[in-house]
Amino acid sequence: MIRKTPRKLPGRREDGASTKAQILEAAGEIFAEKGFDRATGKEIAERAGSNSAAVNYYYGGIEGLYAEVLVEAHRRLLTYDRLVALAEGPGASIDKLKILIGLIAGTITASASSAWVLRVLSREILAPSSAFPVLLKQEILPKKEVVAGLVADILGVPVAHPAVGRCLLNIVSPFAILLVGNRQLLSQVLPELLSPEPAAQGAIIAHFQRFALAGLEAAAAELRREKGD
């Protein structure tokens, strides 16, 4: 009797790292479509082309997998290493912040904004799960500290100064609205805001940069007046 060798799917590596990555990608898509509560490990494994035990084997269960998906989604917006390299590189803090705003705005307003990365994050922001502390500890807080350092330097105050937090809120808020807002409703109210045209996207990014930096400069000037400089 001749034993047939299992047919390998074209383009698919059959090692553990590849399987783990395929599961994470499939999970991101399903979590974006259904949310964490309605997703199942079986469905995720089937979409990844793996067996149902793979979710437990690689991630310890669907809860661990969801936490990894959240962390990966945030990293795809901007990795911590890239942020640190920008912050520690040459140049003025205000120029570095302008680049940072451009990077984030470009990702969120891109024509591929329907990708699972943004939808998973928007779901988690609107209805935080038990996995949110993992995302907070591993991604949000470390990155916030780096950006806060840039803002504090621009303002000329310590990182712990209340003005730093207020300015961070102003900088982040437009992105949060675009992230969690219903795209169809936003396109009806502000059709020019979500135009797929490259020129329109560039104009939006430039506006976000200009608006945020002007606000920071005004806040810095006010702080100098308060100190009598």
Image: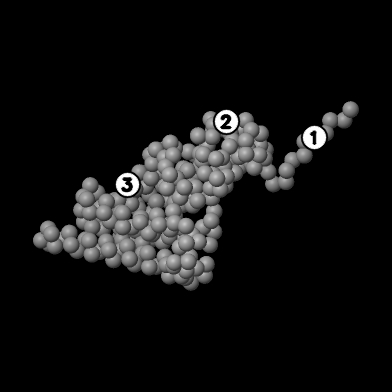
Q: In the image, is 130 to the left or to the right of 41?
A: left
Give the percent coordinates (x, y) of residue 13.
67, 41
Residue receiving disc 1:
5
Quadrant in the picture for the N terminus = top right
| 166 vs 16: above or below | below
Give the percent coordinates (x, y) of residue 164.
25, 53
Specify whether residue 201 is in view.
no
Residue nearer the viewer, 118 or 126: 126
Q: CA distance from mark 1 to mark 3?
A: 53 Å
Q: Residue at x 23, y 57 (%)?
A: 155
Nearer-N-terminus badge (1/2): 1
Q: Residue at x 27, y 51 (%)?
A: 165
Q: CA distance from mark 3 to mark 2?
A: 34 Å
Q: Amino acid at mark 3?
A: Glu
Quadrant in the picture for the C terminus = bottom left
Nearer-N-terminus badge (3/2): 2
Query: Tag on residue 56?
Result: 2
Q: Amino acid at mark 2?
A: Asn
Describe the element under mark 3 as helix, strand or loop: helix
Query: Tag on residue 108?
Result: none
Describe the element under mark 2 as helix, strand or loop: helix
Residue receiving disc 3:
145
How dense is the environment of label 2, judged by Cα within 10 Å: few (below 14), some, or many (20 and up)? Answer: some
Q: Nearer the viewer, mark 1 or mark 2?
A: 2
Q: Residue at x 47, y 62 (%)?
A: 185
Describe the element under mark 1 as helix, strand or loop: loop
Report which quarter residue 42 is drawn in: top right
